[in-house]
Amino acid sequence: LPIFQAFQFKSGEIIASIGAASGVWEIGFASMQDDLTIYIQDIDADNCNAENLDYTIRYWEKFTRKPIQGTFFTTVGTPTQTNLPVCFFDKILLINCLHEFSHITQMLHDIASLLKPSGVIFIEEQLSEEEGTLHEGCGKPLFTHQSLCTLFQQHGFTIEAIKDKGEMVWIYRAKFFE
């Protein structure tokens, strides 16, 4: 999968995925790379909980016909805070969720504090060619390439790499510099 390759997972990494609901993507990644520790984070406790995570793990184990070898935690946050441990993560994933943040400045400040000094953030977002286009699923405004890059630069991040997944979906790799 191109998305899996873009994230360059390595055994032993500690990863947070913010806005991850019940961890469907994340457990899928763990089915392809053993020994990951993944924190599944969301503000919706109805989706982000141990019962749904267990169901997702069982689904992927049945689908792949092998046990998932990893460690998984769920964390419920708020619209302004992830409630995740500070200076702890090798990688943070934002998969199709950044455009849904209602308090983006507070969240990016919080996210920056979660990374280890060598940590990176991956942003996977559907983009629009023009301002004001709404996401078909949630009805929230999409970013343009320029607005997303500007947002991250204004919050102390440097965009290190960009990958076009096609159909206006892009993956950005960013590092935080104080």
Image (cartoon, rainbow, N blue to C red):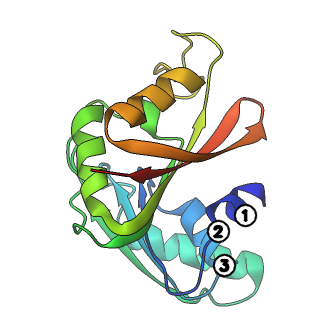
Callout in the foreground (2, 3): 2
| Residue found at x 61% / y 73% | 9
Most distant residue in the front direction: 178
User: How many labels sit on residues?
Assistant: 3
N-term-proximal mark, 2 vs 3: 2
x and y percentages locating residue 106 in the rendered image: 21, 39
Q: Please determine whether, in this image, residue 14 is positioned above or below residue 167.
A: below
From where the camera sits, is residue 135 visible?
no
Amino acid on which disc 2 is placed: Gln
Between 116 and 7, the one lying in front of the other is: 116
Residue beneath disc 3: 31
Determine whether label 1 and label 3 are within 8 Å by CB. Answer: no
Q: Assign a secondary structure to mark 2.
A: loop
| Residue found at x 78% / y 61% | 1
N-term-proximal mark, 1 vs 3: 1
Left or right for 152, reference 27? left
Q: Toward which corner of the image does residue 166 lie, by quadrant? A: top right
Q: Toward which corner of the image does residue 76 lie, by quadrant? A: bottom left
Residue beneath disc 1: 5
Q: Dot 3, crowdedness within 10 Å: few (<14), some or many (≥20)? A: many
Q: Assign a secondary structure to mark 3.
A: loop
From where the camera sits, is residue 31 visible?
yes
Determine whether label 2 and label 1 are within 8 Å by CB. Answer: yes
Q: Please determine whether, in this image, residue 144 is positioned above or below residue 170.
A: above
| Residue found at x 54% / y 41% | 96
Q: CA distance from mark 2 to mark 1?
A: 5 Å
Between 71 and 138, the one lying in front of the other is: 71
Amino acid on which disc 3 is placed: Ser
Callout in the foreground (1, 3): 1
Q: CA distance from mark 2 to mark 3?
A: 14 Å
x and y percentages locating residue 69 in the rendered image: 58, 90
Label disc, if present, on residue 8 of the rendered structure: 2
